[in-house]
Image (cartoon, coloured by chain):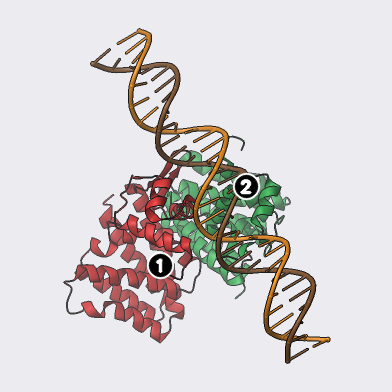
Chain colours: A red, B green, C orange, D brown
Amino acid sequence: MEHLELVDRLYLTVKRMILDQELVPGQKLVQEKLAAELGVSRSPLLKVLQRLETELLVESIPRRGMYVKQLAATEIRDVFQCRAVIEGLSARLAAERATPEEISALRDCFAPFVNDNSDLEAYARADRQFHQLIMKYSGNAVINRLELLTNIHLTAFQAGLLRTPKDTLPEHRSIIEAIAAGDGPMAERRMRGHIEASGRLLLPD
Amino acid sequence: MEHLELVDRLYLTVKRMILDQELVPGQKLVQEKLAAELGVSRSPLLKVLQRLETELLVESIPRRGMYVKQLAATEIRDVFQCRAVIEGLSARLAAERATPEEISALRDCFAPFVNDNSDLEAYARADRQFHQLIMKYSGNAVINRLELLTNIHLTAFQAGLLRTPKDTLPEHRSIIEAIAAGDGPMAERRMRGHIEASGRLLLPD
DNA sequence: GGAATTCATTTTGAATTCAAAATTCAAAAG
DNA sequence: CTTTTGAATTTTGAATTCAAAATGAATTCC
């Protein structure tokens, strides 16, 4: 992390602070104050806050200030709807082009949990890793720029914690098998169903 | 446009300059120079360039500079793949909730072209309007923030000009009819097919 | 003649300054 | 006692300044 540009380091720091609730939803981010706490000036901080705004983590109200974004229920629903089709696309593309090594890496995500589901924290991390890898293996550079759609994962409602491993592990395995079989449409349908199921649980309409 | 904040006016100005090729792909955007031409300082210009970077219109190379983005063929393919599923989702949602007035507005987009297809410029504008309206009528706020996916339209390869009205008008009409009938899955399939067809034409693999 | 090196110039990244708008708080009016 | 007004303070938006890195050109070396 030390070799990164200042703005990139700052970005990771502030993002972490928001995801860890060190900065809480609704809280005003007074630029001079936050910059001082972080040991920088407003210039790089402002860049970071603007970037986080496009990721739906910060909200800017002109001439009023920047706030940690409080996601409304409808926005969470909207994100899940988008994720379902974008990650469905990812799974289809991954099925068409994943190498044997990449398929192994997907299987490895959940290997530790086949016999022991008890560590929910570790399972949630594996879940995030699984979704990230499929987007990466899609080979679609645009998908991988849509950070906006991946941040939901990371907030209080951890996708991996919405449902138990008992429910989601079989879904994950069936997605991996469709990708391993090179069956794009099947992989797409399964991924889409998987995310829609999580979304429905989060928002029972 | 006069009542907007400076950054928002500047954003529209610079975006227009890029889309009109007044600033050409690959061109370096020297901040001080461009700011002076636009009668502002670097601060607001930098915000604008950063925003355009998230929209895939500008590329930033750290400590080197900002450049008008030259989209590679693979990136255009990637954008079309994403658009196909996101606008497919939009059409499905619009089918589920569009009002009679909204459906009329969709029909009105292409009313001028039923008997006369000759004004391609006007048809391209109607095409963009049609896609924008469906995203709006989806009621999904996140879709409407993904500007990244709508800019392709506006560059040299105008989606509406990729294929002739003779080809696309029937597709547009069939999408509208699915929405009017409240048939979400049908609207989704048709929109997706419509955009995939344009994408294939642009990139014959 | 061409490659490498040094130095001046340009440009970016970051901090600071300044002006205008928003907020706060106290005093006055109803 | 509540509401309104207005001045002091804070905060944002924008311009400017400063330092460090990158660029480019001239000169030296091979």
In the rendered view, does B68 fall on the left or right side of A84?
Answer: right
Residue beneath the point at 40% across and 67% down: A88
Q: Chain of mark 1?
A: A
For label 2, the crowd category at 10 Å Cα-Cα, with few meaning under 14, some 14 to 19 and many 20 or more, is some
Circles 1, 2 touching at the beta carbon (< 8 Å): no
Residue beneath the point at 50% across and 60% down: B190
Quarter of the rendering containing residue A65: top left
Residue B200, image x, y percentages: 59, 69
At numbered mark 2, what does the secondary structure look like: helix, strand or loop?
A: loop
Residue A78, image x, y percentages: 38, 53
Residue beneath the point at 35% across and 52% down: A77
Residue beneath the point at 70% across and 51% down: B121
Residue B162, image x, y percentages: 66, 62
In the rendered view, does D1 fall on the left or right side of B192?
Answer: left
Q: Depth check: B96 or B50 in front?
A: B50
Q: Amino acid at mark 2?
A: Ser
Vertical relation: A15 (above or below) B205: above
Image quadrant occupied by the N terminus of chain A: bottom left
At numbered mark 1, what does the secondary structure look like: helix, strand or loop?
A: helix
* In this rendering, the label closer to the viewer, 1 or 2: 2
Mark 2 lies on residue: B41
Can residue B20 be seen?
yes
For label 1, the crowd category at 10 Å Cα-Cα, with few meaning under 14, some 14 to 19 and many 20 or more, is many
Q: Depth check: A85 or A15 in front?
A: A15
> Which label was assigned to residue A88?
1
Q: Depth check: B164 or B58 in front?
A: B58
Q: Give the spatial CA distance, label 1 vs label 2.
A: 44 Å
Vertical relation: B198 (above or below) A100: above
